[in-house]
Image (tube, rainbow, N blue to C red):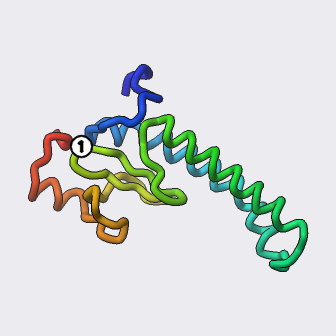
Amino acid sequence: MPIRDIGSNPKIFSLDEACELLDLIKRITKRHRQELVPIRYRLDRMLSNDPRRAAIENDFEVVVERWKVKMEQLGTLPSSLWVVEFDVGDGYLSWRYPELGISYVRGYDSLFSARRKLVEYIEEQDPDWAV
């Protein structure tokens, strides 16, 4: 993907463009996920009424928001925690950490749980974005 395309959200992706961007998305996601490990550790060991809890929960939210903003700057849709979707013009290519690649697709009106295998979808629909 040419550098000039990054940040021009919202973006319509081809399958090749999404796959090309995925390595960067994986690295960013892994880094932010690792940042949350000590925060989650602290939260898991705290009572729910601990007055320090709100500040630590805020730290958690800050990390997640930074990740979300980075995903949006790349033109993708961060649809939930560690889930990134690429708009292809008639739905989304869908990736969730730690999946190895983009293996699923879903329609605009479909829930995440209704994702379909990408290979099957391409064989059935032969979409332009998969060329």
Neighbourhood count class around disc 1 (C-alpha, 10 Å): few under 14, some 14–19, many 20 upward:
some
Total marks drawn?
Answer: 1
Residue 2's place in the image compared with 41, above or below, is: above
The three-letter code of the residue at mark 1 reads Gly
Classify the position of the C terminus by image quarter: top left
Task: Describe the element under mark 1 as helix, strand or loop.
Answer: loop
Residue for point 35% across, 35% down: 11
**Quadrant housing residue 37:** bottom right
Residue for point 39% across, 51% down: 85
> Which residue occupies the foreground of this view, 90 or 118?
90
Is residue 52 rendered to the left or right of residue 93?
right
Residue 48, percent across and down?
81, 78
Residue 88, percent across and down?
26, 44
Residue 67's place in the image compared with 56, above or below, is: above
Residue at the right extreme of this rendering: 51
Residue for point 25% across, 58% down: 107
Residue 31, percent across and down?
64, 48
Residue 38's place in the image compared with 65, above or below, is: below
Q: Which residue is mark 1?
A: 89
Residue 45, percent across and down?
83, 76
Is residue 131 rendered to the left or right of residue 93?
left
Residue for point 31% across, 57% down: 103
Classify the position of the N terminus by image quarter: top left
